[in-house]
Image: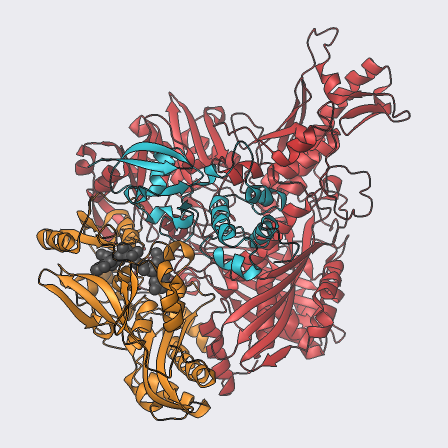
Amino acid sequence: MKQTINLSVNGKDWPLEVEPHMALSECLREDLALTGVRISCNQGHCGACTVLLDGEPVNSCLTLAVDAVGKQITTIEGLARDGKLDPLQQAFIDHHGLQCGYCTPGMILSAKALLEENPHPTEPEIRESLAGNLCRCGSYQKIIQSIQAAGGETGGGA
Amino acid sequence: MNRVPARRPALSKRRRKGKHATPPVTARRTKAPAGSDELKVVGQRVPLFDACEKVTGAFKYASDIRLPGMLVGKILRSPHPYARILAMDVTKAQALPGVAAVLTPDDVPEGEWGERSFNYRGRVLNDKPRFAGDEIAAVAAVNEHVAEAALALIEIKWEVLPHVFGVMDAIKPDAPQVAPYGNVRSTVVEAGDLQKGFKKADLVVEHEAAMGNQSHAPLGRNACVVSWEGDQMTLWTGTQTPFPLRDELARILKLPQNRVRVIGMPTGSSNGLWWACNFQFIAAYLARKAGRPVKIELTQEEAMATVKRRETPTVWGKLGVKRDGTFVAMHVKHYFDNGAHGFKAYPFESVSDLWGRHRPAIRFEFYGVNTNTPNAGCMRGVGDLTISFCTEPLIDKAAAALGMDPLEIRLKNHIIAGDPIHSQKNIYKRFNVPFPGERLTSGAMDQCIKRGAAAFGWKDKWRGFGKPTAVNGNKVRAVGMACACHICGGRHLGSPSVIVKVNHDGSVNLLTGVGRMGQGVETTQAQIAAEELGVPLESITGTHADSGVCPWSPSTVGSVNAHQTGMVTRAAARDAKKQILALAGREMKVPPRELDIKDGWIYAKARPKKRIAFAEMTRKVHPEWLTPPYIIGRAAGNLPVGRIAKMFMAHFVEIELDVETGVSKLLKVVAVHDSGRIINPAVCENQVAGGVMIGGGFVLSENLVWDPKTGRVLNPNFADYKILNALDAPLLDISFAEVIDPVGPFGVKGIGEGATCPTPSAIGQAIYNAIGVRLNAPFTPERVLEAIKEQRTGGRAA
Amino acid sequence: MSIRDKFDLALYDPQPAAADCPQGPITAAGGYACFDSLPPFEYVNAESVAEAVTLLRTHGAEAALIAGGQDLLRRLRNRVHAASPRLLVNIKTVAPKLDAIVETGDGVQIGALATLRQVESSSLVRERYSLLAQAVHAAGPLQYRNRATLGGDLCQQVRCWYYQASGNAYPCRRKGGSECPALEGDNRQHAIFGSRDCVAVCASDTAPALVALGASVRIAGPGGERTVAVEDFFTARGNVLAQDEMVTGVHLPFPESGSLGVFEKFTQASLFDPAVASIAVVLRRDHGVCGSARIAFGAVSPAPWRSLRAEGKLAGERLGAASAGRAAEAAVSEAWPLECNGYKVDIVRVLMRRAVLALARANSSDA
Ligand SMILES: Cc1cc2nc3c(=O)[nH]c(=O)nc-3n(C[C@H](O)[C@H](O)[C@H](O)COP(=O)(O)OP(=O)(O)OC[C@H]3O[C@@H](n4cnc5c(N)ncnc54)[C@H](O)[C@@H]3O)c2cc1C
């Protein structure tokens, strides 16, 4: 049975009719066209579908849309403000922290949560915060460098 | 499917500086290699063209496509490793409300389709499925839940057939025959007289190696969306091979090629997985039968267990060496598991030639073998990765016996420019095209080895074969190194075509038929075009992989694009440039041959101050045409056939191995690559990093496992199939031995595939140095520990 | 080349065939998850424990509790079970919220709905039970720990690639069938201790830590609350919960003075991979001599495996290399590895020895 819910996504409220079995990932992709929420494994292993719930990273494939009511949801589409990229996004571009791009939104959101809590993380802290985000292109070194750059940390091979 | 227009903040900042939208590219230049002083764009570390869309989430993959009225397609798979369908009853499924079509083997051609690089051969739906997971029927329904219910209503009467899982069993004459054309296909690369060669040897060593089952384990889903309008089909899918897919679809659907439009979408990390795949063919037939657009999206499990995996190798080798380390004979037998539908005899076998400096007699035999296991075929580094996993330890054994170190023996035997090439001759023959290059175009294996050793500090860390670098309690540090080479495309794949369109405002559209999988081809091809045309990189936008719009290109496989497509892109840009200079000459009253274009200015070479902006020239109304010129530069598969280069690489690794638990951690990798001139160092560094992770993961942790009874894959997920993550990634030091290849565009060769090849062998050598036992891959903690225990009990010598 | 032979046998042995294969109608998609959208269900936000329990009672097997959903939703997506529940009872909404972490007279009480992140971040837990904080941290990357709950972690399903196979491909004993495909199949990830009825392993890293700490589970049912030691919570094919019961919290007794604890998760590569085996030890040390010890292993049997033999060997012993070795041998003396998982025995031995050595070195009074 469909339920009427209100989701707060990227700072804006959206009234939605959803089935209870709709995952947050599907709801964001299909009802709100936020396809930056990527789905790969759909089982909580890969982190491509990472979104922030009240600032904390979760796998949206293992979160029900109805459970996200009352929480602030941030997707990759919500990071840029007024046409200006988030410093993390810019750092990923400038430091080449991506290849095929599939893991990129999840990577950036995990990094975003990290930097909010810990603006100058060490390299091991960065690595651990990315452990739930797989990159099959193997771009980890440049991803880590991108986050270091955005975190204001200089240099450092990964 | 139009993508959101690129907004590239990093570049648009620069755009503001120039008056005519013609500022130079200002990205930081890497240290310029000799002879590159003239180059403006090639060699620059510019961000990927699509980086902005990727970091904002605006980028679109095939799974993001939705069409009005689109149905969900789902595939029914065989639960048996080998069986025949005696009867299939789909009436109940068909009758289910919401089901638009049920597709059975009766609805598809009797004949098989074939993937151009031998990765798949089979019917679109198989009435005699060859592995557990093989496709046997499909439904199109209004949603997934209806499709699921419908599949469950399909009733099948089976005759279960005896199956065969192991390569060594499948080659036996009385083995179950997996395919109608027999289980084994083979080819040989040879030169010289092997027997005589071995007679000359002072020392003969042998080695046998086996590796596990590697899954492409793609991160990122793929989908295929098909829409028919009359007898015209449009198909969206993530693919590295849009044109070969189009050609085969047209052939099997009996349609003219211009009625089949394949729009190749970017893939998530493909690594050789997404080419022409059977689900795309199913989608085409299913949509036609349903009369509505159909989307088949594969799940992670389907992608990992049914589409393709790397051919599992078993390799034996024998090497004859003179006392001074000169190779005189090399004999290798390489068996590989083609799985159920692969039908390859020819992997990429460049390593056969790698050690030919002193013209040893060589014989490399390749046997592709069908089994009732998941499809197997190309995966990044195909052939050369698995061959070198035997030849590298073989060389080490010889070096150890002769008291040489691993660098010395390799430096003595690797080929250099001008040396003979024998590999790949057979595949040219198979495609009925003459073999173009008998001699190596360029090669800097020596630089790769020497520079790698210096950067790694090899001298300080190397203690001898079978000797660890340092022991600290239960932790052992050890180093290893290995070399490999690989192709940079091949003429047998076909010649790419490229179109360069110059618009009235001076902006440029680059059209190619290449596949996009994050390797950066959009960016690097544009860099080549911009360099040749003399315009800023920002003025170029690419359209790729759309068979209705772009010119034909071969498969994006075998590291073909930078080298081979690059030559054509350069030629097309040159063609456009010639046309523009002709117009400019008339305008500027200077003979065209005295003009050149640089940084967006057309200028007289003798008097650079005499100039006109490129974009001004293209805007000018032509006095006779009464319109600004519309320039189309092209190079359509009409380049003279020349040689194809090979890339070379040496990897140095350091591991830490816990002798109590058998766990090896990859700490550091130094990789030096000869890929000719580097178009974009950032792109290439990422490619090498990825290669190291794929190669390293293959031997450290990845292994697809199937149930010994049912053949069903047990671990088609990222929890049980372990790929290396951010915590496992080693420190990387990547650099390039930039020789300028005489054939490639601006001296460019290739990089993507080869980057995977040396890592497994280098880690293998390090493991050997740590524990004194040469192991087969994967080097799981379990296997390492068992070897340590056996060695301690004296069970086995190195 | 015994390893290679083993590899070959395990993976490549040709099977005589036909008779072994299931006949007749097949499950959709040959058992692979070609469907992984969530199957339809109704969803009720329970407002009290009583309501949740009543719903379970009324709907019987058709209902299931959902907490963080990290285990349940994955199984539903993969069609792991023959039938999926028609009703999910959400207990995250129970009031008062069951996520408090509070000190009681005799210990610390953690609500079942506390997320793993809350548990590891709690100063109470970190100060008094640091091995629990470590175990909870090791359960998975941040994305899980932000959603997964302590109760769900204890009640999650086992690790076994046959049991967990998509499309209910193997209706094994744990699912009410008569066969265990792992016994004859590829059992590298399976149990080395306990009964051979079901050889799946306990996937929870937290459970062995709780056993070592002597924790108990609070269970609510129609008749009220009861308390069961975590050690007794697991059964050969599941846990002691009746169909209409739920876990409301976990109670940790105060550590005895002078007690020390250690937790280690051993994986194939890095921390968040599934455990090959894990160990939790809590013991009292008095002038270098071990008083009583509690030792539990994870991922080696369907329940956390308490090694009474190793505990017995350590009691009264001076902590050091010699006692570590004896405890290690005692720990593995009850193991019966299957064809492919002998490695786990080696790892249990190493974990035990290293744990004792670590405790011999440790200097804080901290469990
Ligand atoms: C990919 C992956 C890897 C994982 N790896 C690990 C690991 O290495 N170590 C580890 O410890 N865990 C691991 N987990 C498991 C994860 O930590 C647990 O699944 C999680 O803790 C379960 O908590 P939950 O609240 O999400 O449970 P849910 O999924 O909500 O519930 C799990 C089960 O418990 C029942 N249940 C939940 N709460 C209660 C309750 N209060 N009373 C009674 N029954 C209840 C549910 O009905 C359901 O059957 C992994 C999970 C995933 C997806």
Across and down, in percent, residue C131 comes to: 39, 72
Q: Along the horizontal axis of the image, is A119 left or right of B751?
A: left
| Vertical relation: C11 (above or below) B342 | below
Q: Along the horizontal axis of the image, is A1 left or right of C102?
A: left
Front residue (pair B767, B461): B461
| Vertical relation: B728 (above or below) B609 | below
What hue represents chain C?
orange
What hue represents chain B?
red
Circle count: 0
At 53% from the left edge and 50% from the top edge, which residue is drawn? A137
Across and down, in percent, residue B122 comes to: 39, 44
Q: Along the horizontal axis of the image, is A134 left or right of A121?
A: left
Q: Is residue C157 visible?
A: no
Across and down, in percent, residue A40 comes to: 41, 46
| Vertical relation: C172 (above or below) B41 | below
* Ligand 1 placement by image quarter: bottom left
Which chain is tinted cyan?
A
